[in-house]
Image (spheres, helix red, strand yellow):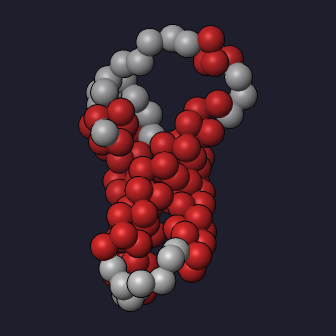
């Protein structure tokens, strides 16, 4: 869903278009919610944490994916979309927030 929303060539106008940094909050929420699901799923399926896998798949890979999407928006949408470094920062903030919340979920999960 993130790939589709990031690369669709047009978006309808909304009343929030004039709100400063509204799109950055959308990026934070989109990436935060998407990757908190990864943490919840991981917590439900594993008894012990593999921190190397979590570091890569639940933090680094989503941020790299975000950077790739920003580059694709800038160079492959024929001017319909533009890449933005602040979008990348907002995406990284969302992913990092998901990591913090996910780590708390992991720590406080019921022990089996």
Residue 96 seen from this side = no
**104 lies above or below 112:** above
At 52% from the left and 74% from the top, the residue drawn is 109
x%, y% of residue 97? Answer: 60, 61
Rendered location of residue 58, percent (x, y): 41, 68
Q: Position of residue 75 (x, y in %)?
A: 32, 40
Query: Looking at the picture, does residue 57 appear above or below residue 95?
Result: below
Count of marks, rendered view: 0
Determine the residue positioned at 52% across, 52% down: 32
Q: Is residue 51 left or right of residue 99?
A: left
Residue nearest the observer in this picture, 97 or 66:
97
Where is 111 relative to 71, above or below? below
The answer to whether residue 32 is left or right of residue 20 is left
| Residue positioned 36% across, 85% down in the render | 47
**Quadrant of the rendering where the N terminus is positioned:** top left
Q: Quadrant of the C terminus?
A: bottom left
Question: Residue 78 occupies which quadrant of the picture?
Answer: top left
Q: Nearer the viewer, residue 103 or 22?
A: 103
Judging depth in this view, the residue of 85 and 99 nearest the camera is 99
Query: In the image, residue 42 lies at what x, y percent?
Result: 36, 71
The answer to whether residue 95 of the structure is visible from this angle is yes
What residue is rendered at 42% in x and 50% in y? Answer: 34
Q: Height in image: 58 above or below 12? A: below
Residue situated furthest right in the rendering: 20
In the rendered image, which quarter is residue 64 located in?
Answer: bottom left
Q: Is residue 4 left or right of residue 102?
A: left
């Amino acid at each position: 869903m993130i790939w589709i929303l990031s690369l669709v060539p047009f978006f309808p106008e909304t009343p929030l278009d004039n709100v400063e940094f509204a799109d950055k909050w959308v990026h934070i929420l989109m990436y935060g919610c998407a990757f908190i699901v990864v943490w919840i799923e991981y917590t439900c399926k594993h008894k012990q944490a593999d921190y190397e896998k979590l570091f890569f798949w639940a933090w680094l890979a989503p941020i790299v994916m975000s950077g790739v999407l920003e580059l694709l928006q800038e160079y492959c949408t024929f001017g319909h979309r533009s890449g933005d470094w602040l979008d990348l920062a907002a995406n990284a903030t969302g992913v990092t927030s998901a990591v913090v919340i996910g780590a708390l979920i992991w720590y406080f999960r019921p022990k089996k």
